[in-house]
Image (cartoon, rainbow, N blue to C red):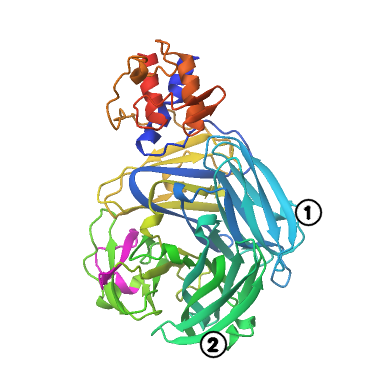
């Protein structure tokens, strides 16, 4: 038993070094023998701050999307979804949503998804158990208690903290011509009374039939009123203000611009920015659609408390295997700002040759700048095999005001830009989004022809070597791999390339490789001083009986899971062996080294 426990917790010590004190992984790499399609999720752990996104694509049905990764800061017991679909929209009403929910903690729990209609009436509850560090997928067609329709959703749990994403797929459309939308769920701290939308379409882009839908969800327990202020994208001039009243608790308002009596009057052929202001906290999503091209871009609007003077994107494409990308930023301040964009190669070196209007520009209040990568990255060393990262930042004025909100988009280029139907969009990452631990709720490896990639950008001044762990729905580690990333560079972890040992769809996989990288010795924050009554506490004697044994481990485990407190038997920080007022994995390593010496 002691031998088993010794190796069961070796992986945990690595995580403690990365300051992830509540992350408690399973002990071993397991094999999978299922002959059915396998779904995975991932955890990315690094030593310094990074930002993460993940993209999914299916070339057979011409569908793709990008999601922002979920830092451990986003783990929450409540998540919101402004739009959840079941057989909705389209001539044959076949747009349906799938939600991926990941448990970020080491305890079994359950959660409930509650769906509301636009009048705020509760339509259905869906309750599911979830394993420690496990994943649950909710495909709305699987639930007979949910009628066909368009809803908003709220996920709640009391026993753990979750992260969740959502996708929408036009399943009633032709097999090779389906629209797809990818969005992160909204943790409750995202709720804000003011949101920024860096781009709105009114019959613009190529082909010139792109239109925008704005979704506003009330996340309070009282009705709210809200307004949408629209500005010209090129100069920030005010165009129109539309007001809406009595949005019921947890309900969402879907505003398709051509169909809304107020918003439809803005001029066609132009791109705009917008600000959503409400009398209470709301969540806001955006959907851009080309009906003729059967293409969609879904992305999160920018809550006011995430507005920043620095924004990051892990992926910039200049004809990378026919993929291109763009960055759109909006000035959220009341005066002009000067902005610069730095592009970083995969070795961390700056891209040296850029067109001047793409690397430095001035933005008027409420105006936008669309930066199309193929027109900007003129460095002859940028080839189609390289994905670069980018940092967008305000150079002046140097004030404490945060002034940037932004999106980034990717698309597979056909005969014209954005005509090959594969496209995706996501919110740019602010510094507050960076972290040392990220969760990725969906990982595809030939899953019904879907594949995925995880892009990691190092936003620290030091080289990092993050480890990507792939887990099955039961929370067990299937495999893992470590990558080295230079400062401000990115690494594109494409599943078919870097996880060839990941079990495929409808195949019997082989056992994933065993073993983990060497585990460095943790450095305590300060040297503990033995007390006369408990001289062996610094070595792991939690009950102060002079022996270090299984009883001390039991006390440590109970206090670790209880954030320093154990209810049965009652104790508080008895297992704080290094006396830093925390019970964490450093304390476990102190006990382990003593008991197995």
> Mark 1 — residue?
145
Is residue 177 in view from this perspective?
Answer: no
Q: Residues within 10 Å of mark 2 (few under 14, many from 20)?
A: some
Q: Residue at x 25, y 70 (%)?
A: 398
User: Is residue 364 positioned above or below 342 on the image?
Assistant: below
Instruction: Examine the rendered structure and indicate whether residue 285 appears above or below residue 460.
Output: below
Q: Is residue 234 magenta?
A: no
N-terminal of the pair, mark 2 or mark 1, is: 1
Q: Left or right of 583: which side holds 37?
A: right
Residue 136 sits in quarter: top right
Span colored in magenta:
375-399
| Label 1: element kind | loop
Q: Nearer the viewer, residue 435 or 59?
A: 435
Q: Between residues 371 and 111, which one lies in front from this camera angle?
A: 111
Q: Which residue is situated farthest in the top direction here?
A: 546
Tag 2 secondary structure: loop
């Amino acid at each position: 038993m002691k031998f088993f426990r010794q190796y069961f917790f070796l992986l945990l010590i690595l995580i403690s070094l990365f300051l992830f004190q509540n992350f408690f992984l399973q002990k071993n790499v397991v094999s999978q023998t299922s002959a059915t399609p396998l779904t995975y999720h991932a955890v990315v752990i690094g030593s310094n701050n990074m930002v993460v996104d993940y993209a999914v694509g299916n070339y057979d049905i011409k569908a793709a999307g990008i999601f922002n990764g979920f830092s451990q800061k986003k783990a929450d017991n409540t998540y919101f979804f402004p739009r959840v679909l079941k057989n909705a929209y389209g001539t044959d009403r076949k747009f349906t949503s799938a939600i991926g929910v990941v448990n970020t903690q080491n305890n079994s729990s359950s959660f409930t998804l509650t769906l509301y209609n636009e009048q705020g009436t509760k339509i259905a509850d869906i309750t599911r158990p979830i394993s420690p560090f496990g994943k649950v997928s909710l495909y709305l067609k699987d639930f007979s208690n949910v009628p066909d329709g368009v809803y908003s959703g709220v996920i709640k749990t009391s026993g753990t903290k979750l992260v969740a994403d959502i996708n929408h797929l036009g399943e009633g459309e032709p097999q090779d011509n389906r629209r797809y939308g990818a969005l992160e769920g909204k943790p409750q701290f995202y709720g804000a009374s003011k949101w920024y939308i860096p781009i709105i379409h009114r019959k613009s882009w190529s082909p010139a039939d792109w239109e925008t839908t704005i979704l506003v969800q009330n996340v309070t327990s009282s009705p709210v009123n809200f307004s949408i202020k629209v500005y010209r994208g090129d100069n920030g001039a005010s165009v129109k203000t539309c007001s809406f009243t009595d949005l019921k608790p947890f309900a969402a308002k879907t505003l398709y611009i051509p169909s809304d009596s107020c918003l439809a009057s803005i001029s066609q052929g132009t791109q705009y920015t917008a600000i959503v202001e409400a009398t209470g906290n709301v969540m806001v999503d955006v959907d851009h659609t080309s009906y003729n091209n059967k293409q969609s871009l879904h992305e999160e609007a920018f809550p006011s408390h995430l507005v920043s003077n620095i924004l990051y994107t892990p992926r910039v494409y200049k004809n990378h295997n026919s993929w291109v990308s763009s960055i759109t930023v909006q000035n959220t301040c009341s005066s002009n700002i000067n902005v610069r964009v730095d592009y970083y190669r995969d070795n961390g070196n700056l891209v040296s040759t850029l067109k001047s209007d793409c690397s430095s520009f001035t933005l008027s209040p409420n105006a936008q700048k669309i930066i199309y990568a193929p027109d900007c990255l003129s460095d002859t060393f940028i080839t189609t095999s390289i994905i670069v990262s980018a940092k967008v930042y305000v150079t002046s004025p140097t004030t404490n005001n945060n002034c940037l909100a932004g999106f980034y988009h990717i698309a597979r280029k056909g005969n014209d830009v954005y005509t090959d139907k594969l496209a995706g969009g996501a919110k740019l990452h602010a510094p507050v989004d960076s972290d040392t631990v990220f969760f990725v709720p969906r990982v595809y490896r030939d899953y019904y022809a879907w594949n995925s990639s995880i892009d990691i950008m190092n936003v620290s001044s030091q080289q990092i070597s993050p480890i990507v762990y792939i887990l099955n729905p039961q929370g067990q580690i299937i495999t893992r791999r470590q990558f080295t990333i230079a400062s401000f560079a990115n690494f594109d972890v494409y599943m078919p390339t870097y996880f060839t040992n990941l079990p495929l769809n409808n195949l019997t996989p082989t056992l994933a490789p065993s073993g983990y990288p060497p585990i460095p010795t943790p450095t305590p924050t300060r040297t503990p001083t033995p007390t006369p009554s408990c001289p062996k506490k610094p070595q792991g004697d939690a009950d102060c009986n002079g022996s270090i044994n299984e009883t001390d481990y039991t006390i440590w485990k109970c206090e670790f899971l209880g954030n320093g407190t154990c209810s049965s038997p009652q104790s508080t920080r008895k297992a704080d062996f290094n006396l830093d007022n925390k019970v964490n994995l450093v304390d476990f390593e102190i006990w382990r080294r003593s008991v197995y010496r």
